[in-house]
Image (cartoon, coloured by chain):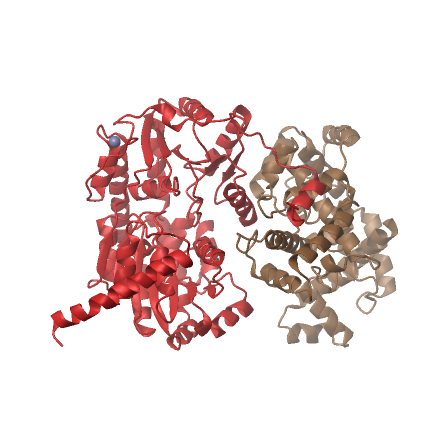
Chain colours: A red, B brown
Amino acid sequence: MSRVNKIQKMKPFKQELMKKAERVLKHTFGYDAFRPGQKPVVEALLSGEDVFAMMPTGSGKSICYQVPGYLLSGLVLVVSPLLSLMEDQMASLRRIGESKVRALNSMLHPKERSRVLRQLNALRFLFISPEMLRRPAVVSRLEETKLSLFVVDEAHCISQWGYEFRPDYLHLAEIRERIGAPICLALTATADRGVREDIIRHLRLENSRQFLQSVDRPNIAVAVHKVENDTVKTEQLLQLLGKVRLPGIIYCASRGWTQRLTDIIRNRLPLRTAFYHGGMLQEDRRKIQNQFLDGELDVLCCTNAFGMGINKPDVRLIVHFHYPRHMNAYLQEIGRAGRDGKQSLAVLYYSKEDDRLPLSFIDSDYPSPEMLKKILLCLDRREWRIEDERQFLSAAENEGASETAARFVWEQVGRKPPGVSFLSILDDCLRKIGERKRRQLEDLAAMRSWISEEGCRRKAYLRLFDETLTVKPRLCCDRCGFPPEAFRREGRLGNRDDREISWESRLKRLLLKKLS
Amino acid sequence: MPYDEFLLLHLVGRFKGERTLSGIYHLLKGKKSSQTIQDSYLFHVEPFFHSLDGLKRQDYDWLTGKCLKKRWIEEAGNRSGKYRLSESGADRLKALGKTHSFPSGLDFTEHVNEESVFWLKLQLAVQTVSELVHGRKSFFPVTRQALVTESVRVFLRQPSQSPSRLALQMFVELRGLLSLCPREEADILVLQMTGFGMGGLTFHQLSCRFSNDLWICRLLHKSALRRLLHHLSAPDSDYPCLRRLLNEKRGTLSLSAGQTYDYLRQGKSMETIARLRKLSRGTIEDHIVELVLKVPSFDCSPYLPEEVNRSILSAARQAGTYRLKPIKHILQDRVSYFQIRLALAKSAAREGSADE
Ligand SMILES: [Zn+2]
């Protein structure tokens, strides 16, 4: 059959499939139409092509594999780096009444895990952590299962240059081959060219269809305010919170600052405020997260530990009390506002004092040469073992390494070729550290130059991602100018904490359904 | 609010210059070492064992630093690392004692090893039932600990119970249990619970809400939780639904000591048990000390003949201390450290039960 012939035969078939896809979208998911960017991805997957898609957070990435999941026969396997992300996606599928969805991760009770593995053939969606995917027992069960799609979510984790590098992601291409090479969809949020190239190479997606959606979020107005010092910064923040639409998220560089700001806001404004950071107990983090999702908080002060996997559509304000280390992170963080498409605001405060923070963070991401040498020597003398990851990490942290630095060492010693000493990889490690630091400093420089940008900020960030601004929104950025009253909060000024204190009425509200 | 000072000075006073500040920290955290467990009986501070399991070392160090700076506590003996109350510290404690007290529910220590897991199970059960009864099938669970998730799953599988009936029964039972607690304790416990449309509060939020010290909030929580466990597990308790969240196993024995106990009852010797379980003799000794403390019916006379027991106790009185070394010295090394620990544990257990 000639090629022309084949395409002509495909065409009506394809149209038929897309009609079916739209019916699924409407009847199963309740949407009238695909959002920009979703349709071409679905179309390509349904015609059997591998896809690499970059879509900004909040653009409905998951629809791209969820809809095909109802049209192709077999299991949709979704590799996801974070438990909270898996939970969020499972939850959204369960909300539309899907029961054939499970997750496999290390938090699962062994009993539950084997239950899931036994029923693979009866499932439609399986979310899996990259660590689980390296277990032989899991892979051999997957070999016996009919798979329709192999989805790699948050694919930027594959890039060593990415700020969320996950070594287990490097094996995905090989595993995909072993389980029958199903059609592959790699999804990533904002990623610059270097990271994109890494993803394509590691997943062997050179021949895939590529869809790069704009990183622009037209409904988020952007502003940067330069201030003299932290005191002025705090005052300006309080003024802002006093009048703009909420709920809002305030990103701070340290745990201490999240607590400090929470206390200040609570004392000065009638707003419901809490803090969130990685040093809190897991249960406490979960409580704050639930309060925020349930609309019980107006302002959340947090570190960058908050956000991944959180899908709250009506966040109106993102504040950066300190600036992040790269534009990717900045865009991801402001992208948590206005997922419902309504007008939102992002404000970044900058003072000279802030410039010290990121540099010290970058340094603490890696072990010092002395520390590294000491650890490698300990390994050679068998004073340390590398059987148990947790033990290794806590031993390294006892030596004064930060968590990220400890992870870096763990990842390097795991890749030592057999038969040579640990010390022999020292130079190689130092070279890698130098390279990565250089890269991070470049990212930082780009972030800083964006902060001091004189022209339109939207244009400037799009330029960093090789894009040009085609339509400028009415409320664009502080350089283009916008009236402050555009974000003014209506109605009463705020909410005091009005949570029920009395245990008996609270217990009633928890367990007894209100008769309506 | 000096509640933290009250707590530390009280404990330093109880330890009479015989323990380090770290020893007190381990007590509050509930470290499962035989030393800490034995001490809590020996110095009659069992209610405080595991009472502040969420305590962070840096917060504790800050507190001890404060009391040192004010010279309320001082080192007992040169560089011993052990601390006692100074005169001004004793005065301070006395003054604080007029306005402060410890919540009495802390005394219910029968389920101390189980209380943390039970609390997670209770929160997850309430959250799940709350979400179900309001028709929401998916939510972020308060905990992801596999063990807790699994037992709540079993708990929810009550035969022929609709979610709303289960919710009603849980409500009735919880209301019954909580009305046995002081109002403030009940408020603190329920405010921490998460459910449909309501995220539970963290301790930090609670202390702001009640304008209270973080320490007292934690102790009030623990007190309420222990009351719940106490009433729930009472022989005549009438809470069949929530009772299912309890572990019906041997009270507070650690798992490992429990296994040793099983072997001992089969008539095996300490050496055999150590070999069978691939444990050191020292560990088996720890288990036996634990059994003496926690199992009233356990007979330790095979290891500690009555006359040896008597001579150790009189030596302890003579030495005026519970420290092992001086006692051994007075008895001219005729007894082992193990025997001294047993004798002290036995007398502590006896005094403990006489208190009740
Ligand atoms: Zn602009």
Please give the name of the residue rendered at 46% of the width and 25% of the height, measured from the top-left corner: A242
Would you place residue A275 above or below residue A496 in this image? below
Ligand 1 picture quarter: top left
Q: Position of residue B238 (x, y in %)?
A: 81, 57
Would you place residue A262 above or below residue A202 in this image? above
Of A334 and A46, nearer the camera is A46
Please give the name of the residue rendered at 72% of the width and 72% of the height, measured from the top-left corner: B270
Instruction: Count how many numbered circles sit on residues in the image.
Output: 0
Q: Position of residue A25 (x, y in %)?
A: 37, 57
Image quadrant for the C terminus of chain A?
A: top right
The reply, left or right, for residue B272 in relation to residue A25 is: right
Would you place residue B312 above or below residue B75 in this image? below
Residue A241 visible? The answer is yes
Q: Position of residue B123 (x, y in %)?
A: 63, 51
The reply, left or right, for residue A260 in relation to residue A369 is: right
Q: Position of residue B80 (x, y in %)?
A: 65, 43
Residue B219 visible? The answer is no
Of B13 and B151, nearer the camera is B151
Image quadrant for the N terminus of chain A?
A: bottom left
Of A296 and A181, nearer the camera is A296
Of B39 and B241, nearer the camera is B241
